[in-house]
Amino acid sequence: MSVYPPARPYGRVAVAGALALATALLPTRPACAHTEVAADRPTALARDATLTFTSEAESDTSGFTQVRVVLPDGIEPDDVKLEHAPTAWKFRAAPDGYTIGGPALATGADAEHAIRVRRLPNAEEIVFRTVDTYADGKVARWVELPTRKAESEQPAPVLKLRPAAAGEPADPPSVRTSEAASADLAGGASTAAPVPAENDDLSAQLITAGAAAVLLALGATAWRLDRRRAGQGGER
């Protein structure tokens, strides 16, 4: 008769706990709505292009009342005309872009509007920093510029453009720069949130991976010990 107590699933518990902790340590990003832009003719130097903006609703308690857009270099406020917007919303030009707004939309309804641009700039991509405002005062700022160092949590809408047709003359460069955008795009601070340094981001990932590996190794060791104890108990 065996004098050893029945083997307990400590190993399985340890492995499950290690997996849970490793998952918890992995970097995550909150799922959230955003604003997108699309064009009927996404080509550099295209004339009379129609750009459609869609602000996805992210509030469960109120609807949109305003959308503010900062135009990129190469597009002036005078070059823009409103094509369509939510019912009763009005278009107002600003020194660095424009604002449309009006009665609150239904909760959960996306805010879509379109503008006609006299001519798109000669660029590979153009960025439209956007601020969405809800009836309850909540503000969603999609203002972070594209970067290869880290994924943005508040990405600005980006329109990628095909190369201009051969021989198409370019307009003279604009003297206005997008950096002149009002400070309210970032809540009274800079126009874009700071981006983590590439080395810092890599170090954090390595630390997370190392911690997960250690936890899994400990769980696997505990599981093997349980199996060995169970085998010894069966032999006696």
Image: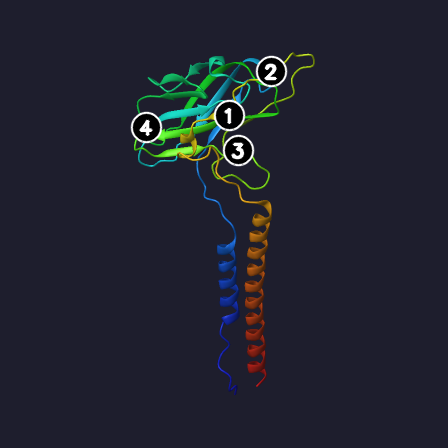
- Amino acid under disc 2: Leu
Instruction: Please name whichever residue, 190 or 88, is drawn nearer the observer in this view of the structure.
Output: 190
State which quadrant residue 221 falls in. bottom right
Measured Cα–Cα span from mark 4 to mark 3? 30 Å
N-terminal-most mark, 2 or 3 = 2
Measured Cα–Cα span from mark 2 to mark 4? 37 Å
Q: Nearer the viewer, mark 2 or mark 4?
A: 2
Q: Nearer the viewer, mark 1 or mark 2?
A: 1
Position in image of residue 177 (x %, y %) = 52, 23
User: Could you tell me which residue is drawn at 54 percent across and 22 percent down?
Assistant: 73
- Amino acid under disc 3: Leu
Element type where label 4 sits in the image: loop
Measured Cα–Cα span from mark 2 to mark 3? 22 Å
Question: Disc 4 marks which residue?
Answer: 106
Q: Nearer the viewer, mark 2 or mark 3?
A: 3
N-terminal-most mark, 4 or 3 = 4
Instruction: Say whether residue 100 is left or right of residue 209.
Output: left
- Looking at the picture, does residue 48 appear above or below residue 181? above
Element type where label 1 sits in the image: helix
Element type where label 3 sits in the image: loop
Question: Disc 3 marks which residue?
Answer: 145
Question: Disc 1 marks which residue?
Answer: 178
N-terminal-most mark, 1 or 4 = 4
N-terminal-most mark, 2 or 4 = 2
Q: How many marks do you count on the picture?
A: 4
- Looking at the picture, does residue 1 appear above or below residue 76? below
Give residue 45's mark: 2
Measured Cα–Cα span from mark 1 to mark 4? 32 Å
Position in image of residue 27 (x %, y %) = 51, 50
Measured Cα–Cα span from mark 1 to mark 2? 19 Å
Q: Nearer the viewer, mark 1 or mark 4?
A: 1
